[in-house]
């Protein structure tokens, strides 16, 4: 049966397997399910065109179903060329009638053609995972077409001046899912070019406390293990960056028996890592001693030529930060005498002139999505519940929001966390009247 | 030799031992030492009268030396009747000529007489550990003398109306060291009665990330072990509250082999505790199963009659929150048929009607200060370095600050953490020019 | 190209992928490589017919290569119907000329036909992973043909009486790899039916301290995660059994943020688990509260009808003990109203009459081999180095060994561990002359 | 009131405080209490003269009461000059009529005079903590009086030849509590000079799995913290030795946030430490980087001149092994230009020629007993329950035992652990009939 909607996916024949995965993930997303049931009844997103640029996974599929249940007219495109689950994409098109543009391993041209498809939808609400949609709209609105990828530029050129600015003006609000994206968006705000309201969903406690820490923590090591089948016990694992993601990765690597070394640029975080029992050193020294390197900084070229040159024979290197810029792979390519791509799935071998072999995992893209299945459903349950509620909230604020980066209201955090605990069968306390009064008073001291 | 300064300490003959402790602590406070050396040269606090209401310990003594080196005319009084180290107090008077009013085990009247001494000094800068000085000054300024302790009331009555408001108007800024105090001060601000600028030193990253977590974590369990000599491995330890202090206590109890149970009122924190691997339940259920209970909530009556009634024979109960209000000891006294005070130093035994015995440690006061020596010097090094620098900064802002709660500037955090790392022999990275630019730009995406 | 040797594998066309895996594993098995190089030069196994019944994985392939390099005439068969890596089996036949009888998912008949192939080889040395070869030979020698699987019985019937006893008499020694196998073999010894010398390779420190603990620990959770994509943080994970495998699984589950509950029958181990900070309870109580159950006991029917009946909706159940008898799946089948096989690869769904759904992973077979790739190479490096050296040692003892269970000589343990450390770049100390003397003397006291 | 019995303690006036401690410990020793109650009824030790050479602590007092309740005629002497709790010793004499020879800080002469008192008692059963009683008796029996301390030698000289050999022949069995002692005793057995049966109580699972690991682990760090008030988080802690004690210390130091470095001479243990996530290196390298050094090896001169010479300014060094020979303090004394004893209680400062200061804690004696209160009662409950039951068992075997080192019967381990679990409110499983049969059979395979 042909799909009723358009889109660009690998193979609709994969839909059955994709549906199985979507249903499996759904079991572990009870908070999002509760929202979907309410959305289905209340249709708070009715009349809204939405474009979401996200990792196309089984968990995202459940978010997509929720948004559609709420009345949104949704287009979904990939936020990373390697992270798409093709069977899920097929099922979304085939079984849920949601247009999806995403193919695992797509080249850059396809990637940006898909971004263009999201923009052509003329969205009233966007959802980003790294701010790619927003930045494209901003470049277009600023008429900086040369800063766009050729695929986007070609399309942007077809737009009138009014259409170019209209694109972004048409947006009620944009949700942002990542630390990296929020950094970009705050930089835009600071530069005075942020032309739409943004909700920093990443900064919600129910998002970054959980997804960044527990999700990235487990799934990054899962990706490493699937890619390499290596034992972590006894290995020297270098974690670059001790933000929420880095804390998660370091903690899980330690939990698996590794000797964890942390590198940082922020002294407060460096000190925190040291007091948490990790060894802290600069990357030049760490380069000489690590067995496995994982970058989670949100920054560029964290491991570069001078560090590759120092590494031990057999060292493994990967990235779990949002963009594949954290490893300076060009420079590694340059100093390698031989490059053997795919000596094993997700593993490229670089041979240095003295015979040392270095292994790059997942081509430097987020290893948890490249080699494993990304964040587990139960943690995405919270992130995506927050996405859905932030979307609803921003629509309710329509016209009230400035072109700035907003936090998700605390009440959303509290509601999501409380429901999550309940679905886990965990009871917590409530404040007594006396306690509530005490916390609000200042009269009682020693 | 009689001390050159006034004050009220237990016994000047203890000074030699106190000096030994002050010097021992000083070894582990290199950041504060560096500040003291600069203050000594620059005298940034010259001309300032200061009153500090803090736990009088060897670490505080080193802060006091630093403030005096900076030119301050300082009076130090106890912030808790049980936490004073009498030998340190003696040495401060005897060896450092700093007036101190603090005696371990002092009764409430003495405690407030000492608070009065701090106020009589007419301070330009105050330093609080629980907001007792500020709240007293506010009550006086508001003419709410009935809300004061009789000792304070008696003195306040001697003041003219102008003196009553002048007291607080005379203050350039007040530093606050605790979470509890900051909660009180924000409540004052919200109520519109905060009549002086406050610096929330507690909220500095170099303070609450470290002192609250690592300091409270280790020293609380140290206090429990000294009070009881109990083995923690295999015990069911209930930690009430999963803020920074609670995280520290839970983590260290786990690290010592306990099975840790966390109770919370905040669902986000409850969920965080669960994902950190702790068992989370409500206090009524925890009461039936715990071997040891530790409150670190900043709230009142967290464990109360209904919970004591459920506890197992032999249960131990203590508090490590700032004020001794977290345990409703009155209600325990009420349901106990016999109360045997001091069956062991720092341990009171309460016998219930069915023969069960419950043990309260340190009379419900901060167990880390009552039964052990409070936070270790190396972590107070950071908190007190931040105190000293915040004091200097607030004096520089004289006249610019409103009657509000301010955060410590980020630069102070970064400076303190960087120097601390250096003294630990730990090198971290610095951003490359390319990285700095990348973090400030928003143009580069996928 | 047809393979030069016989065997029964899935598809020789898979050989290229298998070779890639064998080579990848070899990178992480430096100790075994060193032995292979020496064996190649010295041929200590020359003239020996060997039959090995092991999990046919990339690591085992490297052991097989080593034995063959040592001069052995080797046949390799599967020790578990689900654990074979078909590509590795193909490569062993195609690239290494080693006859292999092993197909992933083979039925019971095939499994025992393969065992028969191992016996038909008339081995002088056997290698077992669960004592299946030895027990078959013993049944045949005892003429207890009815205790054999029909496939084996059919073949055994074709043997003369002399051939039946000759089979076992022909064996110089048999190596045993598992705790489960050693328990069986000691039971045989106790019953007086052990008719050949056995080396308890499992009991070598370099084996069970590492492979059972670190190998099983990581790979079991790896298997669970691959099978389910579940987040472990915040889950209640019930580990049945706290032997070396159970210690490993419990430790790694805790390291991934789970709340771990241990069940035991041995009070010393139960106490050890409690003092290690785990919650310990009986299985009936654990059944009501667990989210994930993992058996690693070496015993039968550890989780049975009465426990399945108590479980929560959505509970996951798996086994990582050697034999698939730890879960009483027949009884679950009986109480389930519907059984949906493969709702997802490696996951069977059982629906109970009240609608609760339970999920069994990997059909109750070792989850680390069923859903993941078994123990990582670096830990099998030690186990298999010990296997190879124990084989060499037992051949040297030919004629000296009684029909009993022997330990691997301590010197083998020390040599393997020392070389492993060296390949990890880790230096340790050596005893000074004074220390050596001190340890051997008893004269020096307080 | 004068005590009814002889002995040599510091001050009988301390008895009240000692009694309080003995009673407090008793609360946490329910297994030993159950044995005491049975012993009191059955008097299994009736007619036996016993000499026990143990650390005289509140826990030991409860063992002494138990032995006396069982009918033994007991003399108790110190096994270490620094570990005696003088108040407990006083109470044992005053309140329990047990002769005790032990004074905290006693000099070597007193120490051996006390050992002599134990021997003069002509014991039928001895109990040792480091084999000092047994080795003295052996030297005397061998007529090697020059190997004795002068105090012992003087007394031994007064004995006839028959009395010299009679001393040891009179002993039914000797219990040994420590790893160190068992090593000495096995060396005696190997040398053919062990002239009495020994029960290696240390080697019982209920002893070394718990007391050595959890007891030494917590109490060693407790000793360090009491001696120094240092924060462990972020420190580089070097643990020399990864036996059961070392495992405990390393695990607890990690649990308190330290970066733990392990040194070993045994490659299997070194590898185990590495796989447990610790950094492993040789002591020469560790010496350059550690902040705190703890020896727990049972060996001599583990840290010696060449290592002290490499240490960082401010390094702290202590021992938690049985004998104070692990640190070569003589060599440190030699290279120090100044030695400041007791810059703080339990802390001696050594100043090297270049100004670096090193700190030795507790004079190199077991830091957990020197600066803290030794093992917590709840873990000694198990060790001493095993001591009492091993004593009873050995008396039942009277005449059956050879002059060899025996293990405690497994049934004792199982009984002690089962009762301990019960007192902790923990239920475990029992084998079903089917399971018991399965474990004893070898017939069931794949």
Image (cartoon, coloured by chain):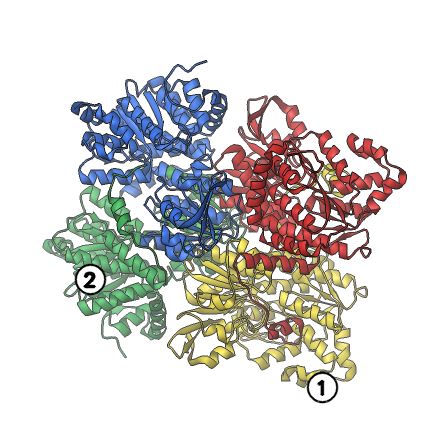
Chain colours: A red, B yellow, C blue, D green
- Residue D50, disc: 2
- Residue B158, disc: 1
Q: Is residue D198 above or below residue C361?
A: below
Which residue is at the front of the view, A51 or A406?
A51
Q: Is residue A268 visible?
A: no
Chain letter behind tag 1: B
Instruction: Residue B190: give x, y in percent of width and height.
Output: 73, 70
Looking at the figure, which quarter contains the N terminus of chain A?
A: top right
Instruction: Residue A144: give x, y in percent of width and height.
Output: 84, 36
Looking at this view, name the residue that lies furthest to the left: D162
Residue at the location (36% across, 51% down)? Answer: C305
Question: Residue A293's image quarter?
Answer: top right
Image side of residue A120 versus residue D444, left or right: right
Image side of residue A220 versus residue B411, left or right: left
Which residue is at the front of the view, C226 or A277?
C226
Q: Is residue C57 visible?
A: yes
Image side of residue C408 versus residue C310, left or right: left
Residue at the location (35% across, 70% down)? Answer: D87
Chain letter behind tag 2: D
Label 2 secondary element: strand
Instruction: Residue A292: give x, y in percent of width and height.
Output: 55, 36
Q: Is residue A176 above or below residue C100?
A: below
State how far apart marks 1 and 2 are (Cα).
74 Å
- Local packing at callout 1 (Cα closer than 10 Å; few below 14, some 14-19, many 20+) is few
Looking at the figure, which quarter contains the C terminus of chain A?
A: bottom right
């Amino acid at each position: 049966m042909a799909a009723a909607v358009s889109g660009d996916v690998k193979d609709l024949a994969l839909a059955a397997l994709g549906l199985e995965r979507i249903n499996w993930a759904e079991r572990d997303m009870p908070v999002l399910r509760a929202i979907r049931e309410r959305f289905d009844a209340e249709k708070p997103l009715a009349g809204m065109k939405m474009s979401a640029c996200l990792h196309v996974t089984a968990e995202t599929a459940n978010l997509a179903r929720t948004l559609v249940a709420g009345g949104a007219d949704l287009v979904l495109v990939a936020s990373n060329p390697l992270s798409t689950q093709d069977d899920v994409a097929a099922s979304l098109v085939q079984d849920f009638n949601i247009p999806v543009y995403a193919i695992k391993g797509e080249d850059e041209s396809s990637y940006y053609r898909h971004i263009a498809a999201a923009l052509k939808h003329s969205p009233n609400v966007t959802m980003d995972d790294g701010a790619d949609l927003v930045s494209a709209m901003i470049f277009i609105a600023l008429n900086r077409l040369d800063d766009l990828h050729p695929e986007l530029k070609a399309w942007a050129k077809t737009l009138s001046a009014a259409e170019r600015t209209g694109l972004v003006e048409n947006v009620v609000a944009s949700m942002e899912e990542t630390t990296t994206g929020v950094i970009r968006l705050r930089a835009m705000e600071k530069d005075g070019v942020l032309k739409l309201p943004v909700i920093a969903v990443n900064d919600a406690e129910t998002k970054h406390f959980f997804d960044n820490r527990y999700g990235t923590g487990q799934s990054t090591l899962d990706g490493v293990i699937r890619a390499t089948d290596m034992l972590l016990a006894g290995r020297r694992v270098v974690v670059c960056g001790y933000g929420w993601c880095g804390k998660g990765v370091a903690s899980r690597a330690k939990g698996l028996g590794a000797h964890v070394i942390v590198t940082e640029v922020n002294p407060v975080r460096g000190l925190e890592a040291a007091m948490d029992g990790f060894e802290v050193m600069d990357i030049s020294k760490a380069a000489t001693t690590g067995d496995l390197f994982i970058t989670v900084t949100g920054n560029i070229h964290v491991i570069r030529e001078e560090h590759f040159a120092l590494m031990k024979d057999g060292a493994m290197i990967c990235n779990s930060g949002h963009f594949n810029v954290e490893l300076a792979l060009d420079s590694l390519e340059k100093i390698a005498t031989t490059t053997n791509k795919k000596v094993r799935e997700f593993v490229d071998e670089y041979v240095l002139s003295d015979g040392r072999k270095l292994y790059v995992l997942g081509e430097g893209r987020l290893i948890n999505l490249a080699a494993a299945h990304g964040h587990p459903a139960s943690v995405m349950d919270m992130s995506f519940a927050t996405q859905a509620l932030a979307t609803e909230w921003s629509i309710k604020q329509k016209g009230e929001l400035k072109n700035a980066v907003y936090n998700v209201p605390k009440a959303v955090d509290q509601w999501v966390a409380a429901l999550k605990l309940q679905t886990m069968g965990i009871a917590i306390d409530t404040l007594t009247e006396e306690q509530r009064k005490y916390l609000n008073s200042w009269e009682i001291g020693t």
